[in-house]
Image (cartoon, rainbow, N blue to C red):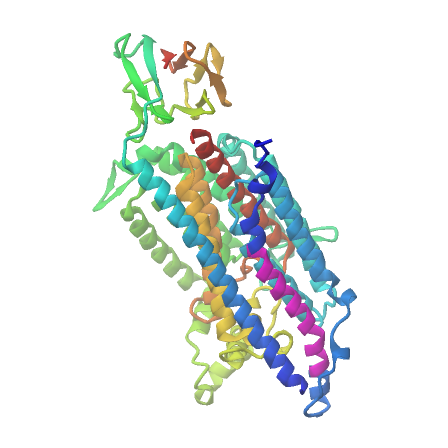
Amino acid sequence: MTLDVFLLILRLLLIVLLYLFLMQVVIAITRDLRKTAAVSSDVGSHVPPIVGHLIVVDSGPSNTLPGTSFDLQPQTTIGRGPTNTIQLTDTFISGEHTRLWFRNGAWYVQDAGSTNGTFVNNQPARDPLAARPGDIIQVGFIRFKLAQ
Amino acid sequence: MARFSPGPVRRYRWKELGLFIIPFMILVLEMIQLPIAQYYQSKIQTNQLSIPFSTALLPSFRDLIPVFGLIAALVGMNILLSFFFSRSDQILLPLAGLMSGVGVLMALRLGPDVGDPILGIRQLVWVLLGLLICIATISGLRNLNWLQRYKYTWASLGILLVGLTIFNALRVKNLDSPTHDQLNFGPLKLQPSELLKIFIVIFFAAYLSENRDVLAEGNFRLGPLRLPPLRQLGPIMLMLAISLLLFLVIRELGLALLIYGIFLSMMYLGSGKLSYVIGGLLIFAALGFIGFKLFGYVQARFAAVTIDVVNWQNWTPAIQQFVRGPAFQIVQGVIALSSGGIIGAGFGLGHTGTFVPVAQSDMIFTALGEELGLTGLFAIIGIYLLIIYRGYRIAIEASNGFDQLLAAGLTSIFAIQALIIVAGNMKFLPLTGLPLPFLSYGGSSIIANYIIIGILLRISHNTAMERAGLA
């Protein structure tokens, strides 16, 4: 075997390996996509479960009535903007005000960069804070009680 | 004893490890081929035909150490990520690892040709450093809100970098030298533009995610176009002014194009309005025309695109003069690409390093084209597409607006940068001095790319953790 034949074999081997790698990645991606599609069709078939409620205790300067109950999904956002799960029309609420999520049986509350802040039992929630049913969550100047 | 912990074994990133196998084979194969190819070329020069193959030509284990070092580092990344960030994306790192491995091999191979024998080793050290910084980025960015909260800090750091670059360019005065945009700190040569683009994306992502609603409404009318209110437009215009400044003062055509491209794609992603993009493109066309009329260097770059290399016999003396001068690099690059043909000359068997200026960084695509051929280039572009696909997928799945815009913006950097420089190398667009992500030689570029990969992995990890908490 001469050297140029050997080099030609190496060259062809490289091309084969490159395309095998591309194929492997594409297969991995397709499998991944199928898995997510299965999960999301699972989720899409029914509305997100309601895992808690927020009950207005003190409506502050807003016109929300005390006692009003809002449903909480496992991932809930509160704010003035139209993309939020709970939309509040109060001038002291920012476009995206608060995020709440339910993980391992506990609620977590975090401010989403609002102007007037989010508080859990009067503690500012700039970083995620855990919350339990009965805790007072203050969004802007509106105070809620977390309930099951 | 029915209960056994499935933890470490099941959470191990097997998929990532599996995807690493073929890249490792490719890297070892190329490393074996390199000394044989060099031997072959030296023999060819002495007109010796039909050289017999013997196993003595195969390199010893010691010669393969650089590649084994890189492989060990990548496996180390796999183990570290499995233990600490097991849920982050598993496909991104094999893709990026293969690309930077090919980059290291190209630097090893081109080093002697461009008169810098330790180029490859330096590139290898940069990649190892980049992997370290990638890990540091993932562990450091525990909370991405931190990036969002200090958005004006990032913006001012970006402005500082631009100021430094401009100051340096004014000091150097020679704007035609290819390295006028580098900052020299002792032995280190830094390219501030590489970090600048990351700062700009973080700022845009934070700013747009906060003003999303206002921008989407667009209540400031200008003829048929609806623009966002001026108060929200201000900071964005400032960032655009920076890119224009780079274009005017230090002649960074590529960087200005990149920043403008990032701006347009992020505006579209943030607001979902095509009218902003069309308006932006119109402004861009107007600015580009003004720049074209004002600056000789822009005209020269565009003139290079119109050269017909195939009919070189019909060149007028003026064009011949032009090709020997400003258009030399691009024409030589096209010749290198064409000499590669379909399957290429073979790794280590081309001559791009000797006849294309700056083949190790700006023109690396032509060097790859000569040695790997059209099939190799298609594979490389395919890998880029998969990296970009993965990045946008991470963006789609992210849980809040800032993470989404950040991931999409950072991925857009890869996409736009690769597009501009590849098109430049192939004479579709004016050639600019941007590095090809992962493949070009250059420390700043490698570090910046691995910071981006780190942030993307972190975002995917955070998203998966939030998802898992719900299940």
Q: Residue at x 37, y 61 (%)?
A: B289
Q: Nearer the viewer, residue B459 or B72?
A: B72
Image x and y of residue B294, in percent: 43, 61
How many labels, in total? Answer: 0
Image x and y of residue A26, in percent: 45, 58
In this rendering, the answer to whether B18 lies above or below A139 is below
**Residue B79, visible in the rendered structure:** yes
* Main secondary structure of the magenta stretch: helix
Q: Residue at x 50, y 83 (%)?
A: B320
Residue at the far front in the pictured view: B1
Left or right: B31 as drawn, with respect to A113: right
Q: Residue at x 30, y 20 (%)?
A: A71
Q: Is residue B33 magenta?
A: yes
In this rendering, the answer to whether B459 lies above or below A59 is below
Image quarter (top left, top right, bottom left or bottom right) of the C terminus of chain B:
top left
Left or right: B454 as drawn, with respect to A71: right
Q: Which residues are magenta?
A: B19-40
Q: Quadrant of residue B99?
A: bottom right
Image x and y of residue B461, in percent: 51, 39
Q: Nearer the viewer, residue B55 or B218?
A: B55
**Residue A125, visible in the rendered structure:** no
Image quarter (top left, top right, bottom left or bottom right) of the N terminus of chain B:
top right
Q: Quadrant of residue B428?
A: bottom left
Image x and y of residue B219, in percent: 25, 36
Left or right: A80 as drawn, with respect to A115: left
Q: Residue at x 64, y 45 (%)?
A: B79
Residue at the far left in the pictured view: B224
Q: Quadrant of residue B234?
A: top left
Q: Is residue B241 magenta?
A: no
